Amino acid sequence: MTIEQLVSVLNNVEVKGDVNKEIEFITHDSRRVRKNTLFVCICGTRVDGNKFIPQAIEAGACAIMTEKDVEVPADITVIKVPNMREAMELAVPYFYDYPGKKMRMIGVTGTNGKTSSTYMLRDILRKAGYKVGVIGTIKIMIEDEEMPIHNTTPDVIDLQEILDKMYKQNIDYVVMEVSSHALDMNRIAGCEYDTAMFTNLTQDHLDYHKTMENYALAKAKLFDSLSAPNLVKSNKNAVINLDDELGSKTMIEHTKCKLITYGIKNDAVLKAENVEIKASGASFDVKYKDDCVHFDLKVTGMFNVYNILGVIGVALAEKISFDIIKETLEAFEAVAGRFELVRQGQDFSVIVDYAHTPDGLENVLKTAREIAKKRLIVVFGCGGDRDRTKRPIMGRIAAQLADVVIATSDNPRTEDPEFILSEVEAGVLPALHGNFHEKITDRRTAIFRAIELAQKDDIVLIAGKGHENYQILKTGTIHFDDKEVAIEAIRGKING
């Protein structure tokens, strides 16, 4: 695409230099620049992309997009825009010819449950014979090819590049976690979703959204998009958790297409009855219109029952048969770091889970409590530079639901870990009622301590990081994997 073609979709743009140059690639990362690249200068909170113009030009950039007046060699074209975010939202999907309008797009939003839901949907759609791509918290998958990811929902440049790659590999369905940040910042510009699923809305990201109402409205933008003007695909569906009082009302108000509600308590279109939660899994009956189908699952916990109901709703909306849905879900095992059992032959249970919100921690602790024969020991922390209000709340929940509470570091980032733990402890101490509590700043030491304390038939729940294999400290990012550390601690205990 020529620069002239690219800028034709922009507003109030100034171009200096040759507009007939061919652009072959767009990036905001100077390390990824190659020949005939348009280098986009993003001014972030910490880094100004304009500082990397010399490196980009040296690597082969033929054009620069910026909000500033910059000095560049005469043979480099400069595209000056008044608002970089708006310019990217318009230009990047256009450059890639809107791949998000050419594949069937399923968006999953909500505070908890997004990752497990997308993985289950991937398995169902593949079982039905479709080629599937997944974009989510853990990684990007194009069928069996895996790529790392840095945000739950990538920015508009990275996302359009990923979608273009998927389209060129003949992907039929893209199943995608859609975060509230991405919706609020419109990172999903140029995408057309076909079915949207809402899991739940509980306290998280209030450092960004400020209020729960703002948080809900950000997520509701996904449902607004299903009835936006100039859509090119048909059969739009919304699948909404009716039992989530906080979020369902807002999502339903913003839905103007076919709606499938799901739930256990309320009179939803898709309903689970006779729910039984066991250590080995969950079982229940699903009622939908004239159908009643029994499910015996390998995953457990009431939160997973809700995730599965939503997934069934999406699959039915996409016209997948109940037979395929049942067969796939009954074979499904836990996603990495999502209520994942760590088995090393020990006589107590160790579970690693990503729960890092008050609701998420409460859900996994309640599930662990339901299946616990003896004590429940929890290791958890709260991230730094994030919503501080949830720290005492999570501390209180841990103290109320566990027998032994070990508070430790999560990703402290630039904050003092001791200060974070003092805020967590403000919730723990009043709620202990004689239960055991320790504060151990070093996460590795905390995990070893929990496993040292564990006796036969106890459950050790290590919460907060799940699949993550790193820890973000003030001094930088280090390798850290809860499951690896737990295995080392268990083996050390067994071998004595």
Image: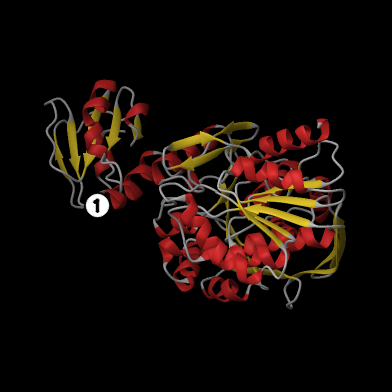
Secondary structure of the residue carrying tag 1 is loop
In this view, the residue in front, 163 or 342, is 342
The quadrant of the picture occupied by the N terminus is top left
Residue 439 image position (x, y, % from top left): 60, 54
Give the colour scheme of this rendering: secondary structure
Crowd band around label 1 with a 10 angstrom C-alpha radius: few (<14), some (14–19), many (20+): few
Task: Find residue 360 and report its image quarter.
Answer: bottom right
The quadrant of the picture occupied by the C terminus is top right
Residue 280 as seen in the image, left or right of residue 378: right
Asked if residue 47 is positioned above or below residue 188 in the image, the reply reads: above
* Residue 307 shows in this picture: yes
Asked if residue 445 is positioned above or below residue 221 in the image, the reply reads: above
Report the residue at 75% width, 50% height from top. 460
* Residue 336 shows in this picture: no
Report the residue at 65% width, 32% height from top. 144
The kind of residue on which mark 1 rests is Asn
In this view, the residue in front, 166 or 473, is 473
Report the residue at 41% width, 60% height from top. 184
Asked if residue 468 is positioned above or below residue 367 in the image, the reply reads: above
Report the residue at 43% width, 37% height from top. 476
Residue 5 image position (x, y, % from top left): 27, 39
Q: Which residue is label 1 attached to?
A: 83
Residue 210 image position (x, y, % from top left): 42, 68
In this view, the residue in front, 221 or 54, is 54
